[in-house]
């Protein structure tokens, strides 16, 4: 197939980034190598696919990756330098990211090339990945898609692993696992709780543990025919132990992988930093462990092996791509020296056999010309077949957009094209139908060429975050970051401060279409009221009047010589106030009563003093001139209760 030149090659983005080469293409974007002409350095530019540029949810996800990665500064995280939009007729105002350029392969490519990694290197790569993830966890982010494709390897004085692609990263407080029943991330590395509940930093630790197993064994621990069946294995099946495949594997490595991939998240390290330290402990003790393991190997361990036990299994790695599990077992137990010796032996045998020597015929020139003519005729026939019926035959790519996935695949396979399925969300194309193809129509194809079908997952569902109690501006930002729209109402609140959210019309945790409008009620603070004057009202009426204004009432009592019993003497406040204020009313008990003392038989002066001290007024009525100076009668009997100031008349004889 004649390749179509990439229109971006050689162009300058935003007057700064000159595009030099295309590095790779993913489901959302294409990555290019570019030169930052302002700072004179190589960078990687990630440019969103043009057909996604008009879809706000994809642009937002792209923007979220920039924000997530820009928060991080760590040697094991790929740095994001810049973000912008290319204003171009050809690219439809496409969004781009500028990232640190990594002159190396991703871990998947390296693993595919090598087959597996040495024990020491696998642990070191995992340690660095966990260190980068730990930095994200400390910043409140969960990566949610940890896998070899999202780890870059930098070759230098030593191997450096860098975590990249934070396109699925979400804040821990808002991270949830599913969206419309579709798990975000790669099923082969997803923790059990991601499929059932919510994503946490421990979910990233699980994925790193699965990756460590794969780096050592050359394959992931669980495989199944469908994603659902694979997810079931992650939830229900026990983690296989590497030592059952390769007995030389130290038990500490099995234990470490078991710790990182525990089914219960609470049993795993809390975050990448804690997990990194556990990996470091195993690395620190690796030499002693291997030395002890080497001594412990018995002849029976070697009985079914095709090669001797390893001299140092921590430092060997093998190409396991085309091997059965039994072959992989043998390779995992084979030292690298044996593998290299076998390769050199095969080469020497080939050279000695003369298989590369072309023995010339010493027959006549006629035979030589006949052979040449036969070769020419055969080549011409082959070329004719290649371009008419063979792989070189050209065909137009059929337009299968809008078709159901199985139907589109059938059309391509009937033309002997190779369909590759990718998935994405779409507001317009229903679930299970083709959104677009890569390459797009019109394109000329050859038999066997790959055609990527982007199949719709339907309208993307998002989880409504909890924003009650947050300030209005913060709540709006939280909803916007979840690709939801905020609408506002206002109301008074006694509990929620002015400007904060009282309530939301869609409960937190509800799954809804992205861009759904969530109505938030914003607090106006406490509602102002006028506190009425309830003086001289009965206690019951006064309480009703104040409560009708939304006020709380506290009742106290006091004696009053002026206010009738049961009526309000006074209140703690009146005039301006707020609903919910407390008003204290003082209710009259009437005048205070005192007990009249008994003064019978007392002298005039003593009786007067005793009554005065009790609060009463005294008048006298002398009988026979009062010569005996003794009280013989009092107008109010002793023991009765009367208000202070009551006049009591004494008869003195």
Image (cartoon, rainbow, N blue to C red):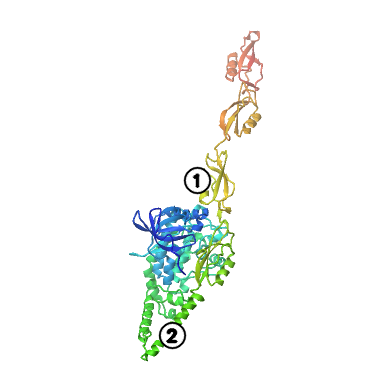
Tag 2 or tag 1, which sits nearer the N-term?
A: 2
Which residue is more in the foreground, 571 or 420? Answer: 420
Q: Do the residues labelled 1 and 2 touch (CB within 8 Å)?
A: no
Horizontal and vertical percent position of residue 427: 57, 56
Q: Can residue 649 be seen in this view?
A: yes
Q: Residues within 10 Å of mark 1 (few under 14, many from 20)?
A: few
- Can residue 250 be seen here? no
Is 613 situated above or below 198? Answer: above
Residue 474 numbered mark, or none: 1
Tell me which residue sits at (62%, 33%) in the image: 547
Q: Quadrant where the C terminus lies?
A: top right
Which residue extends farthest bottom? Answer: 363
Label at residue 230 = none
Q: Does residue 57 appear to the left or right of 116 in the view shown?
A: right
Looking at the rendered structure, the secondary structure element under dot 2 is helix
Q: Which of 133 and 556 is in front in this view?
A: 133
Q: Residue furthest top?
A: 625
Q: Tell me: residue 515, above or below residue 219.
A: above
Position of residue 57 measured from the top left corner of the image (x, y, whole percent): 52, 54
Measured as percent of width and height from the top left, residue 244 is found at: 47, 74
Q: Which residue is identified by label 2?
A: 374
The image shows residue 200, relative to residue 308, as above or below, that is above
Residue 300 figure quarter:
bottom left
Q: Residue 200, percent across and down? A: 50, 57
Q: Give the SS element for disc 1.
A: helix
């Amino acid at each position: 197939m004649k390749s179509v030149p990439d229109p971006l090659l050689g162009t300058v983005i935003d007057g700064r980034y000159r595009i030099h080469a295309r590095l790779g293409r993913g489901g959302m974007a294409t990555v290019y190598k570019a030169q930052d002409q302002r700072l004179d350095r190589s960078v990687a530019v990630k440019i969103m696919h043009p057909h996604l540029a008009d879809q706000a949810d994809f642009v937002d996800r792209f923007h979220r990756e920039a924000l997530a990665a820009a928060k991080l500064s760590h040697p094991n995280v790929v740095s994001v330098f810049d973000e912008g939009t290319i204003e171009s007729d050809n690219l439809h105002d496409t969004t781009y990211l500028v990232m640190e350029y990594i002159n190396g392969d991703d871990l998947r490519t390296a693993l595919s090339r090598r087959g597996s990694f040495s024990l020491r290197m696998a642990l070191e790569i995992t340690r660095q990945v966990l260190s980068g993830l730990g930095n994200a966890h400390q910043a409140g982010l969960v990566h949610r898609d940890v896998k070899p494709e999202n780890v870059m390897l930098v070759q230098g004085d030593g191997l450096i692993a860098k975590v990249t692609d934070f396109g699925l990263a979400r804040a821990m407080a808002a991270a949830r696992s599913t969206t419309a029943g579709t798990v975000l991330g790669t099923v082969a590395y997803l923790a059990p709780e991601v499929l059932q509940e919510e994503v946490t930093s421990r979910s990233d630790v699980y994925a790193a543990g699965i990756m460590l197993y794969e780096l050592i064994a050359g394959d992931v621990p669980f495989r199944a025919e469908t994603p659902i069946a694979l997810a079931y294995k992650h939830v229900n099946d026990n983690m296989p132990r590497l030592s059952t495949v390769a007995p030389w594997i130290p038990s500490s490595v099995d234990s470490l992988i078991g710790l990182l991939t525990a089914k219960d998240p609470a049993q795993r390290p809390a975050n990448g930093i804690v997990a990194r330290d556990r990996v470091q402990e195993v690395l620190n003790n690796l030499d002693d462990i291997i030395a002890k393991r080497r001594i412990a190997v018995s002849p029976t361990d070697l009985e079914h092996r095709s090669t001797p036990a390893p001299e140092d299994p921590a430092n060997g790695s093998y190409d396991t791509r085309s091997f059965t599990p039994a072959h992989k077992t043998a390779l995992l137990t084979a030292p690298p020296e044996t593998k290299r010796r076998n390769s050199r032996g095969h080469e020497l045998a080939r050279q000695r056999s003369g298989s590369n020597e072309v023995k010339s015929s010493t027959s006549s020139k006629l035979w030589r010309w006949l052979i040449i003519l036969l070769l020419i005729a055969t080549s011409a026939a082959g070329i004719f077949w290649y371009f008419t019926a063979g792989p070189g035959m050209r065909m137009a790519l059929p337009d299968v957009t809008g078709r159901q996935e199985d139907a589109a695949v059938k059309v391509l396979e009937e033309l002997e094209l190779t369909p590759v399925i990718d998935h994405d969300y779409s507001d317009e194309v229903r679930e299970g139908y083709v959104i677009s193809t890569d390459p797009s129509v019109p394109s000329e194809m050859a038999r066997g060429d790959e055609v990527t079908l982007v199949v719709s997952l339907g309208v993307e569902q998002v989880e409504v975050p909890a924003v009650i109690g947050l300030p209005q501006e913060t709540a709006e930002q939280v909803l916007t970051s979840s690709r939801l729209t905020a609408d506002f109402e206002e109301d008074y609140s006694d509990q929620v401060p002015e400007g904060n959210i009282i309530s939301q019309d869609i409960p937190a945790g509800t799954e809804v279409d992205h861009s759904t409008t969530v109505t938030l009620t914003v607090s106006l603070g406490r509602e102002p009221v006028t506190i009425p004057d309830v003086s001289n009202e009965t206690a019951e009426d006064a309480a009703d009047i104040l409560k009708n204004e939304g006020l709380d009432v506290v009742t106290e009592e006091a004696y009053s010589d002026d206010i009738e019993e049961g009526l309000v003497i006074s209140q703690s406040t009146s005039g301006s106030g707020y609903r919910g204020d407390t008003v204290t009313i003082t209710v009259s008990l009437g005048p205070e009563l005192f007990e009249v003392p008994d003064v019978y038989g007392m002298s005039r002066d003593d009786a007067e003093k005793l009554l005065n001290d009790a609060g009463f007024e005294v008048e006298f009525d002398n009988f026979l001139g009062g010569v005996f100076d003794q009280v013989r009668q009092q107008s109010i009997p002793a023991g009765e209760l009367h208000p202070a100031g009551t006049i009591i008349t004494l008869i003195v004889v």
